């Protein structure tokens, strides 16, 4: 079945470092892809999305490109800040459902000043 | 505009006790969801309600019941709590319609411990 695999964390970086969090997926067709972020003590919130292959989603300095050749949707940011410390989740729709998402396990990001 | 609110924030139960987790949204969303979050496992859908008056099972419904009280409110009930239900529970909502259902808005969560 369809699935999402994220790199294990935690990922620890210094402020202003370049960030990549890997996400690969297995799916039939070309579903929409999502990144959600969970800040400490809060619920998840949508960070960015891409609705078709080769699309780039972007928000708050984060970017992710939907690459069908490598079935990947890696999250990147050029210069991270302490405030980016959070857990990041990659997700895609469950095939055949209009409501359910398949979630990655989450990658915890720690930014040190 | 409070978004999605959940009560309580924390709860400790003894095995066999029951409780109801409350969720409300003020965004006029049609669809609502209950998830549990366990370490290293991402989110797992317990139940969802596509619209007022309907509920459907998700990935892990056993041991839970839900009620869509009205368009705003969606409650989750544990009839006889078990230690395996120790988790963080999130309520979420989304607009009805295609891809908008995947853009979900989450509450702050309820941390439940069952001893």
Image: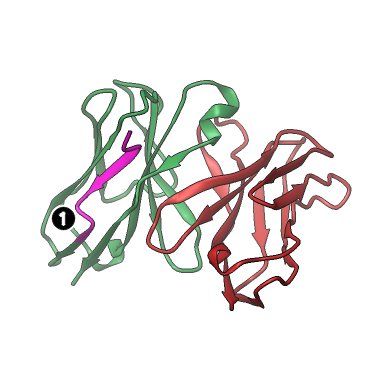
Q: Nearer the viewer, residue A92 or B108?
A: B108
Q: Is residue B69 above or below residue A55?
A: above
Image side of residue A76 versus residue A104, left or right: right
Image side of residue A83 versus residue B77, left or right: right
Q: Nearer the viewer, residue B85 or B32?
A: B32
Location of residue A7 by image quarter? bottom right
Chain holding disc 1: B
Q: Which chain is green?
A: B
Q: Is residue A19 above or below residue B64?
A: below
The tint chain A carries is red
Element under label 1? loop
Which residue is painted at 73% across and 72% down in the image? Answer: A17
Check the picture and name the quadrant holding the C terminus of chain A: bottom right
Q: Is residue B112 located in the magenta-colored stretch of the structure?
A: no
Q: Position of residue B73 (x, y in %)?
A: 25, 31
Which residue is painted at 45% across and 68% down in the image? Answer: B39
Q: Is residue B8 located in the magenta-colored stretch of the structure?
A: yes
Q: Which residues are magenta?
A: B1-10
Q: Mark 1 = which residue?
A: B80
Which residue is painted at 25% across and 62% down in the image? Answer: B112
Which residue is painted at 43% across and 64% down in the image? Answer: A40
Q: Position of residue B20 (x, y in %)?
A: 17, 47
């Amino acid at each position: 079945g369809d699935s999402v695999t994220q790199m294990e964390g935690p990922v620890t970086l210094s402020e202003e470092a370049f960030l990549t969090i890997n996400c690969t997926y297995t799916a039939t067709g070309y579903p929409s892809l999502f990144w959600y972020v969970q800040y400490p003590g809060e619920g998840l919130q949508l960070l960015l999305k891409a609705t078709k292959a080769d699309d780039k989603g972007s928000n708050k300095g984060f970017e992710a490109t939907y690459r069908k050749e490598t079935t990947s949707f890696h999250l990147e940011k050029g210069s991270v800040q302490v405030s980016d410390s959070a857990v990041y989740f990659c997700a895609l729709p469950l095939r055949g459902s209009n409501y359910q998402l398949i979630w990655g396990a989450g990658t915890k990001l720690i930014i040190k000043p | 505009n409070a978004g999605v609110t959940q009560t309580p924030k924390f709860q400790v139960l003894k095995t066999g006790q029951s409780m109801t987790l409350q969720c409300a949204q003020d965004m006029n969303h049609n669809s609502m969801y209950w998830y549990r979050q366990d370490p290293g496992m991402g989110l797992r859908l317990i139940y969802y309600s596509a619209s007022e008056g309907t509920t459907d099972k998700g990935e892990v419904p056993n041991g839970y019941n839900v009620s869509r009280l009205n368009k705003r409110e969606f409650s989750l009930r544990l009839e006889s709590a078990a230690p395996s239900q120790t988790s963080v529970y999130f309520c979420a909502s989304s607009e009805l319609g295609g891809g908008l259902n995947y853009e979900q808005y989450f509450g702050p969560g309820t941390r439940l411990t069952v001893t």
